[in-house]
Amino acid sequence: MTKLNAKIPSGPLAEKWTHYKTDQKLVNPANKRKLDIIVVGTGLAGAAAAASFGEMGFKVKVFCIQDSPRRAHSIAAQGGINAAKNYPNDGDSVYRLFYDTIKGGDYRAREANVYRLAEVSNSIIDQCVAQGVPFAREYSGYLDNRSFGGAQVSRTFYARGQTGQQLLLGAYGALSKEIGLGHVELFHRHEMLDLVLVDGRARGIVARNVVTGELERFAAHAVVLATGGYGNVYFLSTNAMNSNASAAMRAFKRGAYFANPAYVQIHPTCIPVHGDYQSKLTLMSESLRNDGRIWVPKKKEDAERVRKGTMKPIDIPEADRDYYLERRYPAFGNLVPRDVASRAAKERCDAGFGVGNTGLAVYLDFAESIQRLGRNVIEARYGNLFQMYEKIVDENPYETPMMIYPAVHYTMGGLWVDYELQTTIPGLFAAGEANFSDHGANRLGASALMQGLADGYFVLPYTIQNYLADQISVPRFKTDTPEFDEAERKIQFEIDRLLSIKGKQSVDTFHRKLGIIMWENVGMGRNEAGLKLAIEKIQLLREEFWKDVRVVGSKTGVNQELEKALRLIDYLELGELMARDALLRNESCGGHFREEYQTEDGEALRDDQNYKYVSAWEYKPGDVPEKHIEPLNYEFIEVKTRNYKV
Amino acid sequence: MKLTLKIWRQENAKAKGRFETYKLDNISSDCSFLEMLDILNEQLVNDQIKLPVDTISFDHDCREGICGMCSLYINGRPHGPEQGTTVCQLHMRHFKDGDTITIEPWRAGPFPVVKDLMVDRLAFDKIIQAGGFTSVSTGGVPDANAIPIRKEDADLAMDAAACIGCGACVAACKNASAMLFVAAKVSQFALLPQGQIEARERVHAMVAKMDELGFGNCSNTYACEAECPKNISVENIARMNREYFSQAITKANRNQSGGGAG
Ligand SMILES: Cc1cc2nc3c(=O)[nH]c(=O)nc-3n(C[C@H](O)[C@H](O)[C@H](O)COP(=O)(O)OP(=O)(O)OC[C@H]3O[C@@H](n4cnc5c(N)ncnc54)[C@H](O)[C@@H]3O)c2cc1C
Ligand code: SF4
Ligand code: FES
């Protein structure tokens, strides 16, 4: 195990970023024009970075899979974005936002990065308002805030239930402006399939034009990956269908380390799975837990009856209901953090008390709040969510309790990056959900949007210059080099191989099988035997895939089956990496819960002595990946146990 | 339920398209419309030994009604029969056992078919690139609370900004007009102080680009509003027209008052 250097600037916490900016190298305007940057991804992180680079004078090429940059997965974020503005005058500060984020992450994130995130958070809100993002306002005309889990202050800015949409459209506007001006060139419906290194530095990518099917080469002085998270390894998640892990995995295979792959956030309030044709899961905002009470039947017989449909939940008397969160966590009740709430739901369902036709659901009941506050108040607060629920489930949540179940939502792990957001490959940067940087083992609500925009608007525009300053004498690259040839040949070979197998099982069949292995063994509760079994099963599944997958269609023109198959290759490898990481982390922290490591009453048991580090995996061709570590030193805050009981 | 599907198949932009008929059985009414198409595609893959056909290509991503990617024209209506709903949020319980369902791509000159049910909506991006933004660069902006904005205006701006850029309004319009889409963006900025500075340039540049790209004129039939999955109001079109003409007048006035130099 090698120890990694995160290049954290020296000095007091609050001055590190200022020191960095004072000391860093810059590129003068005339030279910027000579430098090319590739940005893969147009979510919050990618769009913000590409627009900012364009404004600064760099020549930028930006890529996205969808037909427009505006469709990136960030568009789906509902709840809000955090910032330390302290507009409500309720005691917030940069330090408090920093502290809450470190604690929420269960003391597994890097102090210096998180502090910087909190420090730039306020500029994000200023920027978005200047762009014309219509945030919610009070009658005074000033911005409104709401509160979210894991915080005692109101620091969340929002735009109805569509905060991600509005922030992304702001960044998309900035990006469009730069495209219109010719500073940024857009390649939509392009999927990056390999990273190209020249003399050990990231110098370009090979992408598949999904309309023509052609492989295209692009060169640049630096490459930024802002390609989102990898939740779709599980097949079913709240991620959009096109969210994938390929860009990160292919960079991993070229030498970028992958950090903390085991850290996955499972969100407690999603609409349960309802059939084996199901393609994705839908999130019901965390805010519902403010007024909804979570319960399951106390008696197994009742649970069985509601599952069969011979009994209705409203007919179960109060005394026969188990409000298990209120019972287990009297102090926080229904508002415990996401990881705690998710595990508790699984525990009840595994014990046979689950509801819904599959038995994998619990009730989220608004009857009491409706009685207390009136239906109109509940409607004003959650009307759009109730409507969405009814559209999908065809049940009226005003009359019968909602059914919810945890689902894969966000991945804290990602490409390892140092303080500059640079990966272990010089010239390759990673931003947004694609990197591992700021959320430790568990992310707080409304902090992903903040991080994506912080990385894109306010961090990369500085740190990338420190790298590019050395590159000004390097002329523009040609793509007819052996390195590009090799990368393209490799992909071509992979595509031909996929199409020639002509097996019996569809791509989705394999993906579903992988999803089940992952969910059962590398999901909410993990243990040594299960993780070992998962590794074994994934290896077998991978072999089976390469023998029996059926990819129809041809390699020219649009072929969505081929697109899915190419992504599945990477999921099949990443799934194993996640299991390995989880197996070697012999403790429970945040979203990573090892059943062997819990307290007597079932709470997570962290091991700071041995595991207060980031694990970063190095790809070894033909061998198992090698684990490296980056020790986490907490200089400025005291490491404590999270407690939500009292 | 049992279904007969008549689906538009078209190899690529240049190829001639045609309808193909498919039968499906055992579809759960809880299944979403796109999941129903997933099942059909799965069936086509499994049938390959018998007859080699390609799966049906269609655009989709979030499947939550927010990304604007899904774009199916079902039984003559963009996004299908349910009001205020994208096709990804449409469920099979809105159809009957034994139904025949016709599925086509958006049909509009500026949105050429890419393959089967997929179209190219780059024209929308180009309209935004022409002026659908404030020209602010990253950094150097005032505090977010420096300029208060009436809540009512902020709410109206949000109503307009809710557009998902799906293009159903264009597909619904017999003239293939993009007025509702453009008006939504123009309105959002017209209602906010941050949008005022470039108001004149914005509305003129966006409208000019829309015309240049071949979108038709608005003849006030309001099919766009009726089919918009986000219920974007045609009041935005009225607001845009006001913007367009008042800004034109200001421009004319300015030209007059500066006239002597001519
Ligand atoms: C339902 C839901 C609700 C959420 N709500 C909130 C919330 O309220 N607050 C909050 O803070 N966070 C929320 N999150 C999390 C947050 O939305 C995401 O973490 C964040 O938006 C990720 O942004 P990103 O820029 O990193 O990546 P994304 O937005 O995922 O963008 C990825 C981009 O990369 C492109 N891409 C990917 N692979 C390739 C490739 N190989 N080649 C070319 N392009 C590629 C895609 O086309 C896309 O443009 C939510 C997430 C979900 C699923
Ligand atoms: S105005 Fe409505 S129909 Fe038109 S693009 Fe926007 S959301 Fe779609
Ligand atoms: S798939 Fe995103 S709106 Fe329908």
Image: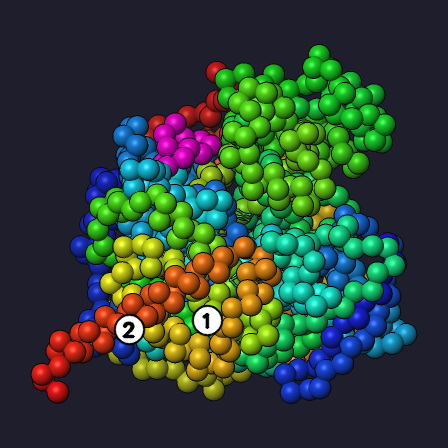
Establish whether labels 1 and 2 are both on one chain.
yes
Residue at image x 79%, y 65%?
A: B101
Q: Is residue A441 left or right of residue A580?
A: left
> Residue flagged by tag 2: what amino acid is it?
Ala
| Residue at image point 62% right, 57% down | B86
Which stretch is magenta? A145-155
**Residue under circle 1?**
B125
Label 1 Cα neighbours within 10 Å, binned few <14 / some 14-19 / many ≥20: many
Q: Nearer the viewer, mark 1 or mark 2?
A: 2
Is A219 left or right of A600, judged from the image as shown?
Answer: left
Q: Is residue A149 magenta?
A: yes
Q: Are marks 1 and 2 in contact (CB under 8 Å)?
A: no
**Mark 2 secondary-structure assignment:** helix
Q: How many marks?
A: 2
Picture coordinates of residue A477, whole percent (x, y) = 38, 82
User: Would residue A541 appear left or right of A103 to someone viewing this image?
Assistant: right
Q: Chain letter of disc 1?
A: B
Image position, residue A318 (x, y; %)? 70, 15
Q: Chain of mark 2?
A: B
The residue depicted at 44 percent of the width and 56 percent of the height is: B160
Q: Is residue A600 magenta?
A: no
Q: Which residue is identified by label 2?
A: B248
Which one is nearer the viewer's eye here, A561 or A295? A295
| Type of the residue with mark 1 | Asp
SS state under label 1: helix
